[in-house]
Amino acid sequence: MFQNIGEMLVLLWRTLQALPQTWRQRRKVSEQLFEIGNASLLMACILSLFIGGVIALQTGPVLVQRGISSFLGGIIGLSMCKELGPVMMAVLIAGRIGSAMTAEIGSMQVYQEIDALRTMNINPIRYLVLPRLVAISLALPTLVVFSVLVGWIGGALVCVYNRQIGISFEAYFSNLQNVVEFKDVFNGLIKSLVFAVIIGVVCCHQGLVTLGGPRGIGRSVTKAVVNSIVLILILDYLLTRVLLYWD
Amino acid sequence: MNTAAPATQNGVSVSVRGLWKRFADQPALQGVDLEVNRGEIFVIMGPSGSGKSVLLRHLIGLEQPDAGQILIDGQSIQSPGVMDRVRMAMVFQSGALLNSLSVGENVGLYLAEHHLKTPAEIARVVAEKLELVGLKGLEERSPAELSGGMKKRVAIARALVIEPQLILYDEPTSELDPLSAVTVAEEIMKLKRRIQVTSLVVTHDRDLAFGVADRIAMIRDGKILFVGTPEAVQHHSDPLIQKFITAEFNQTNPRNDL
């Protein structure tokens, strides 16, 4: 495990060193961005709509009973932008995009395509890892912005149309506006940037160390997704602690 | 490995001295010594698992030896800058074309990634190299649409773009029908005549070895058994070598070893 962590840190460092060459890889970055955005935006919106809705459904009736339903906008607003938006999007992207990254790089490794790159003096980190890491680091925070907005709307719809809750759009959004500050949204974006780097590094590293044939690729994909999600959840706690001090 | 501008001089000499490599508990190379002259086609022949491909991977820097040295034109490949000065290319057993790219993009990848030419010039070079290997006009095809023989010829075209001084071929005729195998063998010969490139061919295909080789090395269990001309190999008295080069299917007396 420690060897893997060490290798991933080295991979991250080498990718960061290659960052100045991103402009040369812009075509591949935009291809990856399209891949991530196009594949995930609709799914991210549907997921967020229901996440916002379910928080409203769980908290709404309880708050109504206690006569504090006016806090609903703030509760849903904060939980979406600080926690659920970044974490749920990271888990979704780890499953959808991280798995594809590992499978693609893993099959290139198994079928000697990466060796072929090396023989042409093309650095696989610059050619394969850099565009993916840059693209996911741009795409995940952007998806989180969509997710948070749609989640707020999902929460609002349930708050307004659920008979047990029944508060108005105005009440919901005015409370949300009073409670949620820009730094809360920014807080979530920082988290999502860290999660994006985690997904990119874990999944690309796992692809590069893939051994064996199709079974090896399958094993690598599973390992990459599971490791990404575990790391995301652990780091989420640690980041929350750190960001609380900043608050 | 070779981002230098193409030079006029072609063909390099290769010396392998006391090369050892071990994977886990398995010895792959056990003190390999070889001398390959400039511009010759040197074939390394031996049964599967004898260490041929591992040796080739060491020559192009994909593996690091446990002990020993590889010299190109007298300079160790581990010395700084040597791998950048010498233009080397490898044709992999599977072709190792990038499946996410088209045939044309594969062939032009080296030039495009190192920004050595403009897109128009790259397209011209790609068309020229593909024509050279008999695959004119296939630039837009995907590697998945090609047959095994075509993939290997695309891989040769990709290697040619580098204008190599040393080409390494890993089992260039494996999985090919006899006609495709002959075409690939002819390509190897043509390249030697045209650009005087040094070629190292790893194979267990006897027809290819005796057809194209200037000299042949027989390898078994990571050790070189013999190095000589194709005639010398054919007339060598070592029973292991004779067994390998004369093995034939015999239903009445099946062999259990090699």
Image (cartoon, coloured by chain):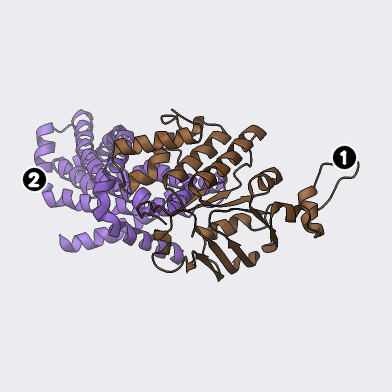
Q: Residues within 10 Å of mark 1 (few under 14, many from 20)?
A: few
- Please report the residue visible at 30 percent of the width from the left and 43 percent of the height from the top: B117
In-image side of B17 versus A82 (left or right): right
Alpha carbon distance from label 1 to label 2: 90 Å
Residue B137 lies, in percent from the top left, at 43, 27
Badges 1 and 2: C-beta atoms under 8 Å apart?
no
Q: Residues within 10 Å of mark 2 (few under 14, many from 20)?
A: few
Residue B247 lies, in percent from the top left, at 80, 47
The kind of residue on which mark 2 rests is Asn
Q: Colour of chain B?
A: brown
- Please report the residue visible at 49 percent of the width from the left and 60 percent of the height from the top: B61
Q: Colour of chain A?
A: purple
Q: Which residue is mark 2?
A: A178
Residue A11, by quadrant, is bottom left
Are the residues under marks 1 and 2 on the same chain?
no
Label annotation for residue B251: 1
In-image side of A231 versus A215 (left or right): left
Of marks 1 and 2, the one in the foreground: 1
Q: Nearer the viewer, residue A215 or A134?
A: A134
The kind of residue on which mark 1 rests is Gln
Q: Chain of mark 2?
A: A
